[in-house]
Amino acid sequence: MKLFRALRTSFERIGRFFQAPRLLLVFVLAVFSNSAAIAQSSALKQRGSASIEGTVRNSVGTAVPGVTVLLESKARAATIEVKTDLKGRFTIASCPAGTYSLRARKPGLTDAAKTSITLSPKEVKQIDLILGSDGTGRIESPNINTSAAGSARAMEFDDKPSFAVAGVSDWSNVGLHGSDTRERTSEALAKETIALRPGSPEALASGAPGSGSSAGAADLSEENLRAALIWDPASFQINHQLGEFCLRAERYEEAIPLLQAAYRIKPDDQANAYDLALAYKAKGDLHRSREQAQKMLAIADNADVRRLLGNLDEQLGDPVGAEREYKRAVQLDPSEQNYFEWAAELLLHRADQPAAEVFVKGFAEHPKSRRMLMGLGAALYASGAYDEAERRLCEASDLNATDSNPYLFVGKIEKATVAVLPCGERVLERFATLHPENPLASYYYAVALWKQTRGGGDSEISRHAEALLEEAIALDPKLSDAYLLLGVLYFDRGNFDQAIQAYRKTIEIAPGVAEAHHRLALAYKRIGDESSAQREFQAFEKAQESDEAALEKQRKELQQFIIILDARPEESPPR
């Protein structure tokens, strides 16, 4: 009733204003018609509008905040502008159905663009943009695949890398704390990436310089070669073949004199000279091996020799020189091995983003290389792009589902990160299915499941994780990590006595695990055993101090590259 009176009063005032009932009626009808039209338009807009969501990243997979994202409609001559948030994400809502173009811009980076985006009514389209740093602004899906890689440019060196190595520094200068889980995991992944190098990077069968040029006679047995050498000690062919035979048999003391004799007879034969350099290196005479390789470069620049020099420089304590040689090897021959050696050297010395850049370019050239994707995953993790790192590693596992290495990398990342990551559970379930004999397969799958119910007590998923941990322990009774996680599961359920037993078993196997002492102390506190809790807290502090001291010592021994980003220095002349 009050509302009716208020409306009547308002209409009377409006009527007096217009001084005519007819004008009043027209006005009221206009107001209601306009309101109805607005409401109808809004309803239609809500029913038919689309939206675009996505993330803007740089060329190594790191999210970029503060990027200007423009959605343009040529038909409507309209532009919508938004900015990415701190995680590089953007959302453009309430877009009418139609065709658009999308562009991302940020000073210092090359634009990324996508044209002819068709939006249907109610559609929510996911579009991720990649800002280029090397003139290759482009759009990509989150996954690197063969088709995308095939269209990427190779590492052509009129297109310089977007970084330069300026020197080295003590890694302890970067201010990292010894207990930082990310850094520990980064170190482990870097070491395991380096281990993906072949056992002999300069494998003789992989095509040494001039390989085959001196193989005129059929391969002979060692006995026949030695007999032939007695009859013709000045034969280059016999000295070379017998020297190479001994080199392959890892009898370096015997190989060197024979290869030296062949070298004196024919110093310009690159295959023999390369074998001689390898023999010196294998025997431990690194300086002499390097001198021999330098002599070869005086005759002809060669990627295999450059790669050998990179190995020698790293062993001789000159990582800057090693990086230069690996880079030159890629310039001469962009093979999968050369790309991997260069990127792995960068990763070893904590140049994470440059390493990721080289791994990306290497994978574009060699899209079937699992280890290139694994190295990229390790570099992205070190850069803080955990989701992208795991995606790359999952892709590596998809390339060959039977290879255990990518799964082990995924497992390490799952264990080290708190958040549930995009594809870990899927691939680790496959790992456990394909490799039931591997205790780490069961353990890492249990880790991925546990993260879904962390602290949630008893559940079907928690029971499944428990069964997997028991399988892992049955396969490897010394797997301390499995006992530790089993203790965590028991603790979450309130089974503190069982948790204490599992933690004590962890410490029995691995007394220096600080986390086990800390968790055991908390479990003792829950059952009211304060003296035991205090003892374990003290053991925790002692183990942590010892662990950090060992890690700091290791870091001081490792040289970290000093990187100049977006640099275009002139190439140094070949050495």
Image: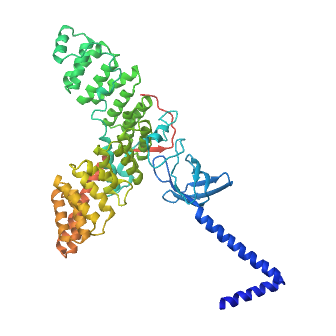
Q: Can residue 505 be seen in this snapshot?
A: yes
Image point (22%, 67%), residue name: 490
**Residue 95: % across, % down:** 60, 59
Q: Is residue 288 visible?
A: no
Residue nearer the viewer, 142 or 56: 142
The quadrant holding residue 414 is bottom left
Residue at the (42%, 29%) spot, across then down: 333
| Closest to the observer, 385 or 99 | 99
> Whole-percent x and y of residue 378?
36, 47
369 w.r.t. 552: above or below: above
- Quadrant including the C terminus: top left
Q: Is residue 461 left or right of residue 63?
A: left
Q: Is residue 527 above or below residue 485?
A: below
Determine the residue located farthest toward the top in the rendered image: 231
The correct choice, above or below, for 404 with respect to 88 in the image is above
Quarter of the figure that contains the N terminus:
bottom right
Judge by depth and name the residue closer to the eye, 43 or 466.
43
Is the image coloured rainbow, by chain, by secondary structure, or in one colour? rainbow
The residue located at (41%, 43%) in the rendering is: 355
Image spot of residue 337 (x, y percent):
36, 34
| Residue 346 shown left or right of residue 139 in the figure | left
